[in-house]
Image (tube, rainbow, N blue to C red):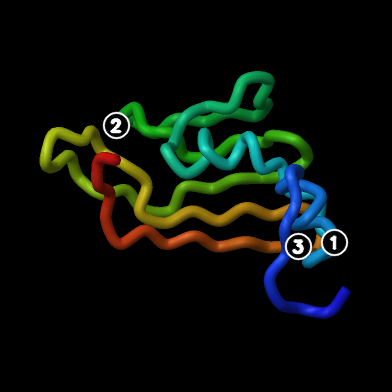
Amino acid sequence: MEGGPRHGADASLLLREATGWEIPVQELAWWVRGLETPGAAGVEYGPDGRLQRMRASGWDIEYQEWLPPQDGFPAMPRRLQAERGSARVRLVVDGWSAP
């Protein structure tokens, strides 16, 4: 299947087909909010109490920058990087808003 839109009930399967990577989609919600994933290992927090790194589902996640608390939100991740073998994903968040 070449690029273009993909449809299906299993986001993990769709990402694996598109990228060849095993990406734990259900854990991503934890990662992007800077929360320790249940079952994570090698968890490290900084002196400010914010998550700095963890290992989850074979991925090493490093939190590189946090946004300060604002508009009723606590400090939230601004930049994080996740690596597993030769796969590397970077996420940069410009801002957070309530649904």
Q: Mark 1 to mark 2: distance in Å?
A: 39 Å
Left or right of 8? Residue 89 is: left
Residue density around tag 3, few if under 14, some if 14–19, many if 20 or more, within 10 Å: few
Which quarter of the picture shows residue 39?
top right
Q: Mark 3 to mark 2: distance in Å?
A: 29 Å
Q: Mark 1 points at which residue?
A: 17
Above or below: residue 87 compared with residue 54: below
Q: Of residues 42 and 90, which is closer to you in this image?
A: 90
Amino acid residing under circle 1:
Glu
Label 3 or label 1, whichever comes before in sequence order? 1
Q: Mark 3 to mark 1: distance in Å?
A: 14 Å
Q: Name the residue under label 3.
A: 87
Quadrant showing the N terminus: bottom right
Q: Mark 2 points at which residue?
A: 48
Residue at horizontal 37%, vertical 58%? 93
Above or below: residue 27 compared with residue 66: above
Amino acid residing under circle 2:
Asp
The reply to whether dot 3 and dot 2 touch (C-beta < 8 Å) is no
